[in-house]
Amino acid sequence: MASELFDSYVPVLIATILGFLLVAGALIGNFVLSPRQRTEAKGVTYECGMLPIGRSRGQVHFRYYLFAILFLIFDIEAVFLFPWAVTIADLGAQAFWEMLVFIGILAFGLLYAWKMGVLRWR
């Protein structure tokens, strides 16, 4: 019985070892083959082939982070909605009501963000 249990883990063990070897090989290859010369041109910030004008670092307003978080929230909602929509017939009524609660919570968050002026572009 123990032999049958460990037989099913052999492919997983082989894939894990192979994965570690590939990653280690890539890291070692990068270390061996990468150029090491430091030049002034390498230290310049790259901006679409043009020389940078002014500072190479600019401040980003926190409003952009709020847009990014809202995008992630609704992107995750889409990730949850697609498999749910595909299997809704097999899941039953409880899954339908749970998804409505989930969408309601996200709609409340969107309404709150809208009310607070987060979505207003200034």
Image (cartoon, helix red, strand yellow):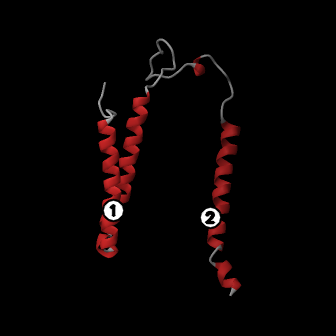
Residue that label 1 marks: 99
Tag nearer the camera, 1 or 2: 1
Looking at marks 1 and 2 on the same chain, the residue that comes earlier in the sequence is marked by 2
Q: Which quadrant of the structure image shows residue 10?
A: bottom right
Q: Are marks 1 and 2 in contact (CB under 8 Å)?
A: no
Residue at 30% x, 67% y: name it. Answer: 96
Residue that label 2 marks: 15
Q: Quadrant of the C terminus?
A: top left
Q: Which quadrant of the structure image shows residue 91?
A: bottom left
Please provide percent x and percent y for residue 29: 67, 43
Q: Quadrant of the N terminus?
A: bottom right
Three-letter amino acid code at the position of disc 2: Ala
> At numbered mark 1, what does the secondary structure look like: helix, strand or loop?
helix
Please provide percent x and percent y for residue 92: 31, 74
In the displayed orientation, state which residue is furthest to the top: 54
Residue at 63% x, 58% y: name it. Answer: 19
Horizontal side of 113 relative to 22 (left or right) equals left
Please provide percent x and percent y for residue 17: 68, 61
